[in-house]
Image: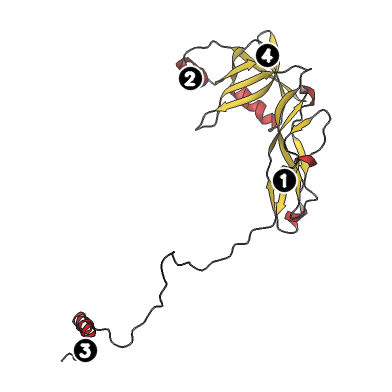
Amino acid sequence: MKEVLLEAEPREITTRNAINALRASGKITAEFYGHNEKNLHLAVDAKRFDKMMQEAAGGNFLVNLKVGTLSKTAIIKEIHRDMISQKPVNIDFQAVSASEKLEVNVHIHIVGIAPGVKLAGGILEHVLRDIKVKCLPKDIPQFIEVDVNSLQIGQQITVAGLPKLEGVEYFADAHQTVVNVVAPTILEEKPAETPAGVIAEPEVIAKGKKPEEGEAATVAAAEDKGKKPEAKK
């Protein structure tokens, strides 16, 4: 399991304005907690934290928190982000013990190209992107690789088909789909439908000269009385 160093500094729980000023100065507030551990209120440098996350490339890792003379081993339990900018505003660090198993989420990485996609034009659906596992800190995988080099259209890989890792227990339904290949969707054009309750009538095209407004009124009145209208002179 990869371990990275991150320096942190203690902070006091103060007012909202003070916390906003701390964040405006380029710091991220953080909390450290865990079994048999004293809770610590911290602040970490935003640029250093971003660099650490980029180097991790989405994989799991242990964090060696340096707080003055203290050294604490932890994992990132949760990152709270600003709703608009999506920048981290607070980080939860959970203490870990080398002898205690943890439950953590691990990313699933797809490896290879499915023949059903490359040769048959199918669509690869990555259904399950993270999975919860339970293991000792030293056994936490950075990510789980799923090889799709043999998948044809209509085939899938389920949780039961994930690689077996020593000391790692998966917490998910064994039948749950992780990735599959489906046939491409063919869109067919449909004729316009007549709204419900409306009876479509054929269009009638009148022959000959179109009657003027006065003539149309005379014709209509005559038809009502069963008489043939007189021709206009």
| Vertical position of residue 169 compared to residue 147: above or below | above
Check contact, mark 2 vs mark 4: CB within 8 A.
Answer: no
| Vertical position of residue 214 compared to residue 24: above or below | below
Amino acid residing under circle 2: Asn
In the rendered image, which residue does mark 2 sit on? 20
Amino acid residing under circle 3: Lys
Q: Nearest the camera: 197 or 26? A: 197
Q: Name the image quarter holding the C terminus.
A: bottom left
Q: Earlier in the sequence, mark 2 or mark 4?
A: 2
Nearest to the eye among marks 4 and 1: give it: 1
> What whole-number distance in Å separates the C-alpha atoms at marks 1 and 3?
79 Å
Please report the residue visible at 72 percent of the width from the left and 49 percent of the height from the top.
180
Identify the secondary structure beneath mark 4: strand
Residue 76 image-quadrant placement: top right
Identify the secondary structure beneath mark 1: strand
Nearest to the eye among marks 2 and 3: give it: 3
Please report the residue visible at 62 percent of the width from the left and 21 percent of the height from the top.
92
Identify the secondary structure beneath mark 3: loop
Q: Earlier in the sequence, mark 2 or mark 3?
A: 2
Check contact, mark 2 vs mark 3: CB within 8 A.
Answer: no
In the rendered image, which residue does mark 1 sit on? 179
> What whole-number distance in Å separates the C-alpha atoms at marks 4 and 1?
40 Å
Which colour scheme appears in the figure? secondary structure
Q: Which mark is residue 66?
A: 4
> What whole-number distance in Å separates the C-alpha atoms at marks 2 and 4?
23 Å
Q: Which percent across, then down, holds residue 166?
A: 84, 30
Please report the residue visible at 73 percent of the width from the left and 54 percent of the height from the top.
117
Please report the residue visible at 42 percent of the width from the left and 72 percent of the height from the top.
200
Amino acid residing under circle 4: Lys
In the rendered image, which residue does mark 3 sit on? 227
> What whole-number distance in Å separates the C-alpha atoms at marks 2 and 1?
43 Å
Q: Earlier in the sequence, mark 1 or mark 3?
A: 1
